Image (cartoon, rainbow, N blue to C red):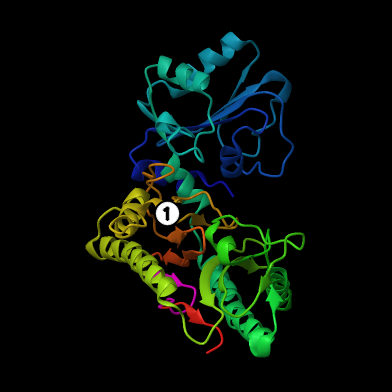
Amino acid sequence: MFNLSTTQDALREFGFDGWLLQDFRGSNMLARRILDLDGKPITSRRFYYFVPAEGEPIKLVHRIETGVLDHLPGTKRVYLRWQDLEAGIAGIVTGHPRVAMEYSPRNNIPYISRVDAGTIEVVRGAGIEVESSGDLIQRFEATWDDDQWAMHSEAERGTTSAYDLAWGFIRDRVRNGGVTSEFEVQSLIMDHFARNNLTTYSPPIVGVGSHSGDPHFETTSERDTPIKAGDFVLIDLWAKVDRPRAVYSDLTRVGFVGKSVPAKYEDVFAIVARARDAAISIVRDAYAEGRPLQGWEVDDACRAVIEATPYGPNFVHRTGHNIGQEVHGNGANMDNLETREDRLVMRRTCFSVEPGIYLDEFGVRSEVNVFIDADGHVHVTGGPLQRQVVPVLA
């Protein structure tokens, strides 16, 4: 629910003079969510809602859709011609030198870049400095309340227990020369989710051998592969409780179908685990020191560990992603590879830490979730940190 006082507090906190929110035919879903328009019919004309850091908001709407923002506080201005629109935009931002919009310099963070270049030109033409609303979006889109933190913890219990079930199932099926398969294990996990009132947008990844070396391998019945003694297995699963506003738990662990794990697997896993722990440490250290932290710094700390080994080129994705009501949420990612993530690692947000090394024969990933509470305490969720490859038949 849009709250003017809370929004203006956030504008002052981040040093903005105002926030210009706009949409055209659903092009800016972030603004639509902020303005309580998510799920409502998408209009055909452009609208603008300007929230100043102080004072009353202003709505700029087209003559044939004048009611689109009537549920929001503020005065209304109506335009018809395109000339009226450009003059109207200039009129509502004038006197507010630093304005936030859903814009990212050089499209560095595409999750935020929802405003077209032409609109930015109009605003800048009024002598206004346009800056990214990335951290504002985080504040309203990515932060959790206490109920959501509790639902994440509940989901974590279900996702963590799925691993004991999966490893035990593989062990029981493979002992004495038997086999199971990727799809069988995936189906087992999905049944476990259903029994525990968990839901997910997509089934888990169960990858054996070379399939574990594909970061986005998809387990399906059509290309099902046996799992037998001597195989390396990666399981990546994600779920949330089946209730409104629930948030995800997203975890990855690896195992070897044997009584002991060959050194080639353990050696690579040890590097990945050190990288994971380095990412967690920089978050904990920053909050202990009370200093701001940006997502790219977490990626750098993690990546440096792997790049100090011969496996640097085999870490081919960001360190982590924001987690929310979607498994890939709208807050800061831990990334200085695919994007330079300069949004803050903010209180009441959650993200994954999941470094990986991907080889032709096998791939190792270790994924946990990190939540920073309102007091700045850093919580690592997903059960005890995996310290070695699971010897499934031990």
Where is residue 2? Give x, y as percent.
56, 46
| Front-lying residue, 159 or 117 | 159
Whether residue 273 is visible to the viewer of this picture, yes or no, is: yes
Where is residue 186? Give x, y as percent.
69, 70
Q: Considering only vertical position in the picture, is 158 above or below 317?
A: below
Q: Considering only vertical position in the picture, is 368 above or below 180?
A: above
Q: Residue at x 25, y 60 (%)?
A: 290
| Front-lying residue, 1 or 100 | 100
Where is residue 239? Give x, y as percent.
62, 66
Q: Residue at x 43, y 65 (%)?
A: 370
Pointer 1 residue: 314
Q: Considering only vertical position in the picture, is 290 above or below 379?
A: above
In the drawing, does residue 317 fall left or right of residue 12?
right
Main SS of the magenta part reads loop
Residues drawn in magenta: 378-387
Instruction: Residue at the far left: name it.
Output: 289
